[in-house]
Image: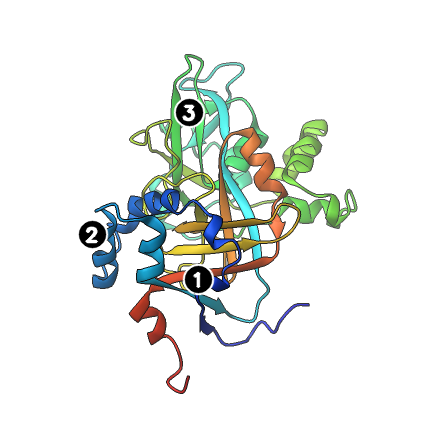
Amino acid sequence: MTKPANAEVTYKVLSFDELDGWAEDDHSAALSVFQNTCQDMDDPDWSTLCAYASQRPDARSFFELLFRPVLIEDGKDALFTGYFEPELDGSLVRTDRYRFPVYAMPAEARRIRPWLTRREILTSGVMDGRGLEIAWVDDSVELFFLQIQGSGRIRLPNGNFVRVGFSGANGHLYRSLGAELVRRKVYEPHQVSAEVIKNWVRRNPVDGRELLFHNNSYVFFRNVDQVPAHKGPLGAMNRSITTMRSIAVDPSIVKLGSPVWIEKDGKDPLRRLMMAQDTGSAIKGAQRADVFFGTGDQAGKAAGRLRDPGRMMVLMPIQRAYALLPEDT
């Protein structure tokens, strides 16, 4: 049952005993991920906690003594989805195989909002001869989904990698290919997934190219090779995120860097302490989170299957948590 969308944001402070599965988690792993970004949280209470975390305290005691779980609700049902870092095959030069460019953002696209549509960018010649190609890849469909994810790795023929991250977009609203295929009565809503869309485009190369143009939004990239290949991509805090320990949240409600306890229900329940280290354009609301599944095809398939209910609690410094409560509680 969907709750009223215009409900006020409410806060409820819980005890750790009320968190399902809390005692069974690997708190040390969570503390290590917390340390990756806590130094960038400049509020005094967070800075103090981060300094203490660097002394390697007992992880479970660290969280239980210095934080309180806060259930934040805004009237919308909880929803957990997944995301991942795609891995594409590509080259630094154009060849017969590698012919789809991964573009850096042209200066005029930052000044003019909105700029050209996806179709205009790719067919008008406006990008030609400007040296904006970061790399070339072998699959236009995978490149389209790289743009949806916002970051990824490109595997070069010599085995090395180029890592790219989000630089900006053309300013047009994202239009769902899955919703368009449903509108055309190609699929029923429950049948649509990223893999289904990819396969349909490949089976129908002419109509598939037109389907990609249905989404006017276009994402540009930047080279982020300063991040070693064995580490995760950069999140919204400009630090590497961690497989199955980092989530994307709505930063207008959840402070980036905060520990967040996840109770994801569904086919494969998940009870884990995550870190809010990323954001996403579709991640809006107090009970909305995107779980980072890692890099590559298997991570992508697992992320694509996730669309589950549950609840999440933000761990806040004790004084900050109780300061959120109404005065009459």
Residue 290, percent across and down?
51, 49
Q: Is residue 286 visible?
A: no
Q: Is residue 305 visible?
A: yes
Give the mark toward the camera: 3 or 2.
Answer: 2
Label 3 CA crowd tier, 10 Å (few <14, some 14–19, many 20+):
many
Give the number of the disc on residue 51. Answer: 2
Q: SS for tag 2?
A: helix
User: Is the Cβ of the residue at disc 3 closer than 8 Å to that at disc 2?
Assistant: no
Residue 257, percent across and down?
34, 53
Label 1 CA crowd tier, 10 Å (few <14, some 14–19, many 20+):
some
**In the visual, does 272 lie left or right of 51?**
right
Is the C terminus in the top left, top right, bottom left or bottom right quadrant?
bottom left
Q: Distance between the residues labelled 2 and 1?
A: 23 Å
Give the mark toward the camera: 3 or 1.
Answer: 1
**In the visual, does 297 lie left or right of 329?**
right
Q: Mark 3 points at which residue?
A: 135
